[in-house]
Amino acid sequence: LEQFTLPDPRPALATIKAPTLILWGRADKVVPVAQADQLATAIPGSKLIIYDDVGHAPQEEASAASIADVRMFLNNNK
């Protein structure tokens, strides 16, 4: 297990052409918020929204805000 490594995902992420919205909770204890910035940097033209005082599931923990943000993103990318 000490020798187990995953391949670098950045080359594959860089090929994404679709409009991409990334929603993240600043209080995520499963996947650190620093990885949200790395993901957003790796996906060209992506939009990152970070919710304060929200954990790993912003779609559940901040449902009203995340729904509004998804709707705005979809309307702006028609």
Image (spheres, rainbow, N blue to C red):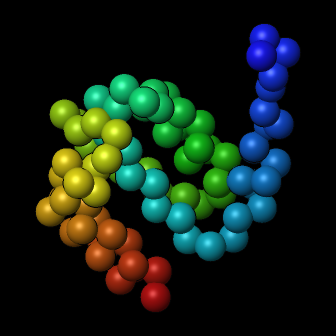
Residue 44 placement, left or right of 74:
right
Q: Residue furthest top?
A: 2
Residue lying at 69% horizontally and 70% vertically, measured from the top left: 17
Residue 39 vertical position relative to residue 53 in the rendered view, above or below: below
Residue 61 placement, left or right of 29:
left
Taking depth in this image into account, of 24 and 37 the one nearest to the observer is 24
Taking depth in this image into account, of 25 and 40 the one nearest to the observer is 25
Q: Residue furthest bottom?
A: 78
Taking depth in this image into account, of 29 and 37 the one nearest to the observer is 29
Residue lying at 30% horizontally and 74% vertically, measured from the top left: 72
Percent across and percent down for residue 27 are: 29, 29
Residue 5: quadrant of the picture: top right
Residue 9 vertical position relative to residue 27 in the rendered view, above or below: below
Percent across and percent down for residue 10 are: 75, 44
Q: Is residue 37 visible?
A: yes
Q: Residue furthest left?
A: 64
Percent across and percent down for residue 73 are: 37, 72
Q: Is residue 50 visible?
A: no
Residue lying at 79% horizontally and 53% vertically, measured from the top left: 12
Percent across and percent down for residue 20 are: 53, 64
**Count of numbered labels shown in the rendering:** 0
Residue 75 vertical position relative to residue 72 in the rendered view, above or below: below
Quadrant where the image shows the N terminus:
top right
